[in-house]
Every structure is written in structure tokens, then in C-alpha cells.
Amino acid sequence: MYVPFLSWRYLLRRRINLIGVMGITVGVGALIMILSIMTGFLEESRKTVRGSLSDVIIQPLHLPRRDGVTPPRSAEPLLEFLNTHPKVQSACAHLSWGGILSQTGFEAAETEYRLKDPQGSDLAFAHFVGVDVADEFRTTELREALERESKWRIPVENVEDPFARPASYDGDEPWDWVVVGEQLARVHQLYQGSVVDLITVVPDTRRGEAMTSNRKFLVAGTFRSGENEIDLSRIYCDRWELSSFLRDTHEYTQVLVKLDDYSADADTIAEELSGELYDQGLVHRAGSSEVRTWEEFRQSLLGAIENERVLMGIMLGLIVMVAAFTVFAILMMMVTEKRRDIGILTALGATRRSILYIFLMIGMWNAVLGCTFGATLGTIGALRIDAIEQWLSSTLGIEIFDRDVYLFDHIPSVVSPFAVILIVIGGLLATAVFSLIPAWTASRLHPIDALRDE
Amino acid sequence: MSTQETILSATDIRKSFKIGDRDIEVLHGAHLELKREERLCLMGSSGAGKSTFLHVLGLLEPPTEGAIHVHGKSAWAMSVPERAALRNRHIGFVFQAYHLLPDLNAWENVMLPMRIAGSYGTVPFKKREAAEEAAGLLERFGLGNRLKHRPNQLSGGERQRVAIARALILQPEIIIADEPTGNLDTGTGERVLDLLLTQQRERRASLLLVTHDERIAEYCDRTLVMEDGQIELDSTVAIPD
């Protein structure tokens, strides 16, 4: 009875305890807020990264197998098989190729000279992706990327057929139309109807050399995937047009698969599909990296964000440790200050154990109050981070969160109750451990020495 | 006034302190017997070992040798919680320097032994009843209007009265008072002593009083004089009417 009473009284009567409470509040609050934001970033990034892909990516090697079978160079058998698979919702073929975009138009002969110029700012690396629009819309989020509102958007005239010549265009060039990433269009000041030269090299298998290929295209509009790298380099066009541009050397490079229930099959689907595709003669080797889930495909990016989150957690966890250490310092000071009280309490019948509990409980009051305030403020802060950021930005007159940099229109934040509970338990445990030493010191004080200490 | 029942006894108490690598013996086989309702005065010059003997008798410090018996039970053979409970329930301390907890008001200071007793379950702690009892006692001691004052807001005499109330609240059988008037002026000291002695009689408790003041010793049934860590003189003096 008297342990909670006395510990609470000591807590209230020594204002220095406020520093301990505030330290834990700041540590726990910051940890919850930052981890929520990092989790939000991770989830948002996962959505963004996932958006330009699908659940499973199949990239068959078209090499002869030991059993004499060579996986077909056409996507049709693969698509046919996948579209009848019980776990597959839809699939689409991609022809993915790298090259250079130039605005001004070059003859092939000039290309080599221009490429040697490191200052050639009108050249850009481009990632050409040839798609079948109907299949693509069913399997990936290209439609959403075409329709996503943003400051720099150049909308395609007809989303259902994005590579069609816009009715409003009055030019008479015979070239095909492409859709470019929003950032690419912004950097190179492209507009609807801009002429771009696409330059690439393709292998000449007969002569064992590389051949250059270039062709003019017209910009039909932009897309915004939300992933900066893609929006800065990707150019969508019709798969057969791209195949023609590549001198019919390739029909497809990968097939994207959307599953009925990715979350249920994520762990096993790659291996399962790989085995089945091997049996069908559609991939080179079973269990290889020819069949990967989108998470495996983007492991490096997702891993980097996850690493950042863990590192931030560790760094901010140190703040909680520092706060717990502050409680340790405050309690050590209180033990010195309360030497006489310890002697009096012993004379009145208190045991060493209850003296230990009194000081341990003062530490725990610090922790309970700090964790409660910290968890409340941290959770509110994480949930209202956008309003807080906007208020701070307008008050300080600086842009704290540049939405164009991250291509998010808000600061993502996901508060995980489990994480909050874990952080609170961590705060309580750290403070308990740091409080034990002063509490133990108090309990070992000799009552007579304490009473003599005038 | 005392009956023959021995309530507290100390037999051949020796107490040494280690200073550096030397053992310094302060008590050299001290004896004492405190009878029920007896007023026993312990006198002696400074450094004679009175305070050490008092701390050993009050179970605050273990003797190096010898035995302390309370109600015939060896106190240092008990477990730590048992001894602490015994100290809480059966011994009331009054110190020269009052030793009130500065963060508690007078009322809370007096209630503190009851809270501690509640933790042992020896006396169930009921806050309302405890508060009424503590307030009643303080009112009887003339501190009815000082209940919520903290020690630093009270005079020396008031503090000592609060300390006496705290020592008596659990109706202990033994009161150990170490120079209870040592820090008070003569008039206040007399009033405090009068209160202590009256309460001791009313409650039929035994009093072990340490003092330098021979006039105070005159109020006691018996006086022990301590010299060089031993009881040198045991005399019975007349109790004034």
C-alpha cells in the first residue's frame, strides 16, 4: 500500500522527474511517428513498385534444353497456358528493350558521334516497353497510371487505345505514337505531338554483330506510375510496333501474371509455376530465376526501404535508451537526496525489498507516464502528419515535404498497433532495467548511516 | 509502576565496527532488561555507546555478539520481514532530529506506520479509519489545525509532537526515545516530555529514554548509566508524584 503511495508522492514532489517523463515521451513518440511514416513509405512504395509490374514475372531463357526442347520465342503458348491456369486471373506479354531518346532527330550515322558527347543533354536513356493494351489493362495498373491526375500530366486522348493518333492532332506524319513517363516528358519538355527519335541496337545473329536501329515516334501523352525511375525513362508503345522497330528480332521478353489471390499463394507460386512451365516446355529450367514474384524481382529496392526502417528504429530506439538513462540519473540523485527517508522508513518497519520497490516504482511511473504520453502523441502525430507538415511548412515558410520528389500527394503513415505496443513495452523494460540499479543502491543503504546523515 | 514481565532484553551485547582493516568494538557486553510499562532511562557521556546500544535494541542494527529478545523471542533469529514487522508493530521511535518525511504532511506522517503495517497484514489498513485515528491523535496533541502542514511548516515542538504521534499510532509496547527534547528549548522540551510520559502511561507502554539531562532521568523508574560500552550503574530512583 505504501509503496505506490510514497513513490507517487516522490514523483510529484521532485519536479526533475518531469525531465525523465518528457525524455521518454519524446523517445517513444518519435519512435512511433517515424516508424509509422517509414512503414507508410514502405507500403506506398510497395504499391508503386507493384503497380508497374504484376504478381509474377516470367522471363524465359530461349536456349535449347538438355531434353532438346527450346522455349518458344512467341508469347502465345505461354499466355495460352497461363490464361487457363486455375490460380491465374490474367497475363500479358511485355517486350522490354533499352535505347536512347533524342528530341531533335538524328540519322543513324550521326548517332555514334552524338553518343560520344558526354554533355549531350538532349539524349536520354529510354526503356521501351511494348504492350498489348487490353491484356495490360487486365494485368497491370497501366490504366491507372494513364489516368492519374498530376501537375505535369499530358492526358492521352483515348485511354482505351492510348497509342492511337489523337483526333485533335492535325499533322500528317506517318509515325507511330508512344506514351512517355511524366518525368521524362517534363525534363525534355515534351508535349502531345512532340517528335522523338528512338535509337537502339539489336543483335544481328547472322553476322554476329550489333545493328543500330532508329525510328521517329510521336508523343501521345504521359503516364505516372509513381515510381520516379520508371516515370523518368519508360516509354510505352504497341508491342508489335516495338518488335518491328527491333527488326523483328524479338516478340516478347517477359510475361506478367496477375493471380487470383497473391497473398495466399505468394510463397509457393513461383516454384509451382516454374515446375509446370518446365513440364510444358515453356521455360529453360525448373526452379530457376526465370519465374519470380514481383517482390523477388524488386528485392533490392524493397530491401533498401526495409533496411532504412530498421535502421531508423534502432537509432530512435537509442533515444528511448537515453531517456531511460536520464531516469537512472534522476533516481541516483534521488537516492542520495532521500538517504534520511530510507533510514526513517526502515525504522518504521519498511523492508529493504519495499525500499527497492519504492525507487523502482518511481522509475516505472516515469516510464508509464512517458510511454502513455509518447504513445498518444506519437499515434496522433503519425495519423495527422500531413496536417502537421502543412502547418509547419506554412509557419516556417519552407516546404518540408516536396510531394514531387516522392511522387506521393501525401505523407504516407501506417500506425501498427502491434508496433506501438512493442515500443511501449520496450520503453517500460528499458526504464525498469535502468531503474533497478538506483533502486538496488537505495535498498542496500544502511538505515543507521542514513539516519545519521544530517 | 512496572510489572515483572520482561518485554525487551539485551544479553551480553557486543558491537564492533570495521574501520579500515581494524575492528573497533563499541559495546563490550552490555545488558539491559525492560519490563512492561517501565520507564527506563539510559544516560552516559558522549561516545559511551548509548546511540549504538539504542539502535541495536531498536533492531536497526545487528549486534556482533549477544542476543536481543522481544517477548522472549530472539529478534535476530527471525527473518528480515518478520523483524521489520516486529519493529513496525511493537516499537515506536522518537528521534532527537524528529525524522519526519519532508514530502508528507503531519497527518500523512502519522499514518505512515499504519500503511506499512497494512503491507504486512498485521493491522489491515483502511484509509478512512486510519485518517480519522491519526487526525484524532494529532488533535489530542494540539495539532488539529496543523494536519496538512509539512514538517518544514511546523515548529520544533510541533514536529516532535507529530513524531510522538507517529511513534504511538500503532499502540506499540516499546517506545524508544533518543534525546527527544535535545533540539527543543526548555519550555517546549518540558511540554513534549510531559506529553510523551503521559501517553506512555495511558497506553501502558514501556519507555526506553536516552538523555543527557539528569532532570529528565528523575521521571524514570530506573536509570542505567553507560560508560565505555558497558552498563556501569543500574539505579532505581523515586518517581515524583
Image (cartoon, coloured by chain):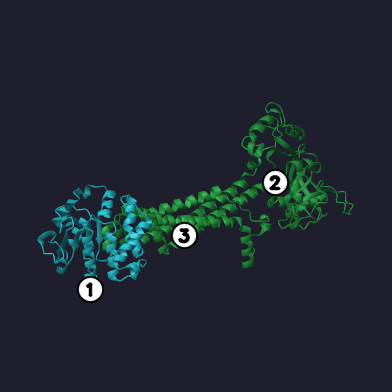
Chain colours: A green, B cyan
Question: Mark 3 or mark 2: which comes first in sequence?
Answer: 3
- The residue mark sitting in front, 1 or 2, is 1
- The residue mark sitting in front, 3 or 1, is 1
Q: Residues within 10 Å of mark 1 (few under 14, many from 20)?
A: few
Q: Indicate the chain on which mark 1 is placed.
A: B
Q: Position of residue A218 (x, y in %)?
A: 82, 51
Q: Position of residue A368 (x, y in %)?
A: 46, 55
Q: Is residue A359 left or right of residue A382?
A: left
Q: Amino acid at mark 3?
A: Val
Q: Position of residue A294 (x, y in %)?
A: 66, 42
Q: Indicate the chain on which mark 3 is placed.
A: A
Q: CA distance from mark 1 to mark 2?
A: 92 Å
Secondary structure, mark 3, is: helix
The numbered dot on residue B187 is 1
Mark 3 and mark 1 residues within 8 Å of each other at the beta carbon = no
Q: Is residue A165 left or right of residue B105?
A: right
Q: CA distance from mark 3 to mark 1?
A: 48 Å
- The residue mark sitting in front, 3 or 2, is 3
Secondary structure, mark 1, is: helix
- Answer above or below: position of A437 versus A391: above
